[in-house]
Image (cartoon, rainbow, N blue to C red):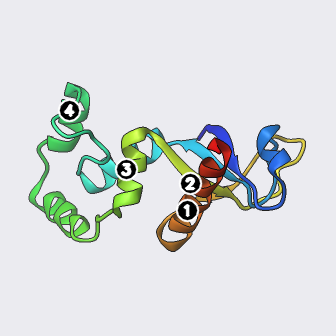
Amino acid sequence: TRIIDVVYNASNNELVRTKTLVKNAIVHIDATPFRQWYETHYATPLGRKKGAKMSEEEEAQINKTRSKKTEKKYEERKKVAAVEQPMEDQFTTGRLYASISSRPGQCGRADGYILEGKELEFYMRKLKAKKGSKAS
């Protein structure tokens, strides 16, 4: 998926300003591929604004007719399909926070993971504090 922006780096703020990708940098990534996977895997809409209409294609993907066996499989998956509220908010905006776990070099490949739970809360606090100090 696409990396949109570098938003935080614990070691050096200069790396954020120049948008340098290094290990453990916190970045914004495009949420669309993850939303599409979630919606096909769990047959549940994710990160939609209240009252927003889905396109007919997306509507058909979620509500298509399935065999009883497949329907049962999706019902089982829906039991564990809960997403935390901060993650839900990120899917609504279309951007997810992620951390780079590899050391990106010349080849242009960066591996990482999406932030969630305690780690997401921690970095959201850090970013909010950083924005607050910028304003004054």
Determine whether the residue tagged by mark 4 lies in a helix, strand or loop.
loop
Total numbered labels: 4
Q: Which mark is residue 89?
A: 3
Q: Amino acid at mark 2?
A: Lys
Between the C-alphas of marks 3 and 4, the distance is 15 Å
Q: Residue furthest front?
A: 136
When asked about the image quadrant of residue 42, the answer is bottom left
**On screen, residue 126 above or below 62:** below
Which residue, as the protein is rendered here, is positioned at the far right?
Answer: 106
Q: Quadrant of the N terminus?
A: top right
| Residue 94 to residue 75: above or below | above
Residue named by callout 1: 125
Looking at marks 3 and 4 on the same chain, the residue that comes earlier in the sequence is marked by 4
Q: Nearer the viewer, residue 101 or 109?
A: 101
Q: Position of residue 53 (x, y in %)?
A: 18, 30
Few, some or many residues within 10 Å of mark 1 (<14, 14–19, 20+): few
Q: Residue at x 56, y 52 (%)?
A: 97
What residue would you read off at disc 2?
128
Label 2, label 4: how many angstroms apart (C-alpha)?
28 Å
- Seen at 49% across and 65% down, the residue is 116
